[in-house]
Amino acid sequence: MLIFDFRTIGNKLLAIRKKAGLTQYEVAEKANLSDRTYADIERGTVNMRIETVLKICEALNITPGAVLTEENPNLIAKQSELLAELDKCTDRQKETALELLAVYLRSVNSPE
């Protein structure tokens, strides 16, 4: 799911930066931004252009998807439910279900 809230994006950048052991100044320097601008981005008080997002992602060595998307909790719950149901099946039923899923995934991922 795509994130549109700048505060959420800023919080994700903060967590990623801290995990990488970098300071705001270091990320700003690598992204060719002022440290003040980068601090505002992490606070979520600045509207970034896509070029800025890409520079920051490059500086943090991450993909834009790591910052601009989040998991859909409903989707995760549905997946867990289906896996729990699959666990209750016989081996033959599991094979059939997995083969059906494989056929479906190949059909949606094949170039037209």
Image (cartoon, rainbow, N blue to C red):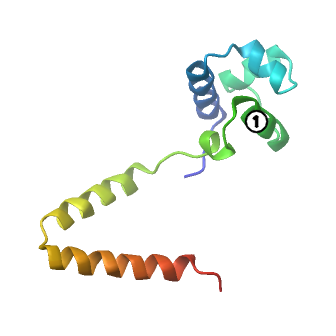
| Amino acid carrying mark 1 in the image | Glu
Can residue 112 be seen in the rendering of this structure? yes
Q: Position of residue 79 (x, y in %)?
A: 32, 59
Q: Is residue 83 left or right of residue 33?
A: left
Q: Is residue 26 left or right of residue 71?
A: right
Q: Kindly indicate the quadrant of the structure image that contains residue 24.
A: top right
Q: Is residue 81 left or right of residue 108?
A: left
Can residue 4 be seen in the rendering of this structure? no
State the residue at coordinates (12%, 66%): 88
Q: Which element type, helix, strand or loop, lies under badge 1?
A: helix
State the residue at coordinates (83%, 19%): 29
Q: Kindly indicate the quadrant of the structure image that contains residue 23.
A: top right
User: Which of the two residues, 63 or 82, is positioned nearer the viewer here?
Assistant: 63
State the residue at coordinates (70%, 30%): 60
Q: Kindly indicate the quadrant of the structure image that contains residue 20.
A: top right
Q: Position of residue 41 (x, y in %)?
A: 73, 25
Which residue position holds label 1? 58
Q: Position of residue 58 (x, y in %)?
A: 76, 35
7 in relation to 34, above or below: below
Q: Position of residue 62 (x, y in %)?
A: 66, 38
User: Which of the two residues, 44 or 102, is positioned nearer the viewer here?
Assistant: 102
96 in relation to 33, above or below: below
State the residue at coordinates (37%, 76%): 101
- In the picture, the quarter occupied by the C terminus is bottom right
